[in-house]
Structure formats: structure tokens, C-alpha cells
Image (cartoon, rainbow, N blue to C red):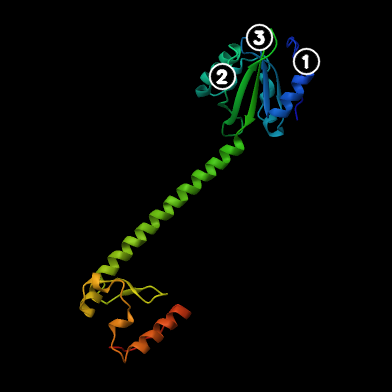
Amino acid sequence: MTQFRAPQTSLGDIDPQIAATLIAATSDVAFVVDKSGVIQDFSLSCDDLSKEGWSGWLGRPWIETVTVESRSKVQELLRDAAAKTPPRWRHVNHPSTRGADVPIRYSAIQVGKDGHIVALGRDLRAVASLQQKLVDAQQSMEREYARLRQAETRYRLLFQIASEPVVVIEASSGKIVEANPASVELLRKPLNKLTGRSFIDEFDSESRPLVEALLQEARAGGQSGGARAR
């Protein structure tokens, strides 16, 4: 952990050691900037952030350490702090030397009487990683849904054009859920008359025990043998 160093310039009536303790306890990164926005000191509580080369930022304007699209947010943070308006959190990105930008959520307050501003930041990389995983999972689900819709479309097409009678039966009740056109023709009833009826009722009384045995066999083992029924 990089220890917070008290700036050479005075922070007014706030004890630097107390300020350092509070900053270290409430943030992952903290900057002390003067009224011109130049970094006078900084603190990092994460060793991983210290590998980003931020040690070279001392004496540089804070606005030059962020990505182009984040500069207006830094200006707003400095302006609001100087005006002593209630602090607001803003998402700011710092360019990284190791890959993706480093997202930090900052709030800034003015301390003392000489216009110095303390910017407190929270590392958002873990949140960004979770958000990316959520996006990836959502995209994966959408691809899976698309695949299932395509499979269902193919099933419906084959179901409708099949020359052999095909009937879908609810396992628990034995009632007809779907029947293809070939089944409608064979059973000589319109589809709306078949749906919801017991499949066994479509056979004569002598064949019903045999059909029931086939259904029981399918429920128990997932498939059944063939049989002749009227």
C-alpha cells in the first residue's frame, strides 16, 4: 500500500495526519490537487493500481491523467468542489499501460482555506468485470434462445408435413396435447376436438389396455415397444 504523504502546502485547519487516515480508510485512490487542478500528492490502497505508472503524476494536472471523454467530468468535480456544492460521484477512466482503461468513481471536496481539493476514488474494475460477465451471460442466453427458436421452428415444420400420424401426449394425464394433420385424418376428428381428450379414448375397448401398457412403459423407461391396436 502506498502511504498518503502530507502535502507541503498547508491544508488549513485540517490536521494532515487525520486527513490521511480518513482518506486511506474511505478510498482506493486519493488525490490532493491545488486550486489549479495540479496533483500535489496521492495515495493508493491497492497494490495493483500502483503498477499502472501513476507515480509519475505528481505535478501534473489531474485532467491530463484521464481519458479524453472523462476530462469534462474532472472539470465538473473541480468546479463543484471549489464552489463547495454537495459532492457527487462521477465515473472517470484512466488510461492503462496494461490493457483496458481503469475505471474509478470519484468524489471531490475542498479542504482548508487555500483552495486545495481532495479527490476520493473507488476502483470499479471488479464492478466492470461483473457487468461484462453479465453482458456475456445475457448474450449467451440470447444465442441459446435463438437456437431453441430455430429448433422449434424446424420441429413444427417437420411435425406438420410428416406423412406418419404423430400425437403428443401429456405424460401425467394421458391427454392429447398436439396432433399433426396425418393424425387428424386418421382419427377423423378436427384438431380442436382431439386436443385435451384422453388418447386411450380414441381406441376401441379391447385395444385400450394394450395402449395403456405402452404408455406406462414409455413413462417408466422413456420409450416403448410397438403394438397393433384398433
Name the residue at 38% across, 85% down: 212
Which callout, 2 or 1, points to the residue nearer the camera?
Answer: 1
Q: Amino acid at mark 2?
A: Val
Q: Quadrant of residue 46?
A: top right
Query: Can residue 4 be seen in the rendering of this structure?
Result: no
Task: Name above or below for residue 42 compared with residue 161.
Answer: above
Task: Name above or below for residue 114 compared with residue 199.
Answer: above
Residue count near mark 2 (Cα–Cα under 10 Å), binned few <14, some 14–19, many ≥20? many
Is 38 in front, or is 182? 182
Residue carrying label 1:
15
Q: Between disc 2 and disc 1, whose residue precedes?
A: 1
Residue carrying label 2:
74
- Calculate the distance from the C-alpha at mark 3 to the C-alpha at mark 1: 15 Å
Name the residue at 57% across, 40% down: 129
Q: Quadrant of residue 47?
A: top right
Asked whether disc 2 touches disc 3, contact meaning CB atoms under 8 Å apart, the reply is no
Residue 210 x/y as whole percent:
37, 89
Q: Secondary structure at mark 1?
A: loop
Asked whether disc 3 touches disc 1, contact meaning CB atoms under 8 Å apart, the reply is no
Residue carrying label 3:
115
Q: Amino acid at mark 1?
A: Asp
Q: Between disc 3 and disc 1, whose residue precedes?
A: 1
Q: Amino acid at mark 3?
A: Gly
Name the residue at 60% across, 29% down: 104
Q: Quadrant of residue 23?
A: top right
* Quadrant housing the C terminus: bottom left
* Quadrant housing the N terminus: top right
- Calculate the distance from the C-alpha at mark 2 to the C-alpha at mark 1: 26 Å
Q: Between disc 2 and disc 3, whose residue precedes?
A: 2
Left-right relation of 176 to 224: left
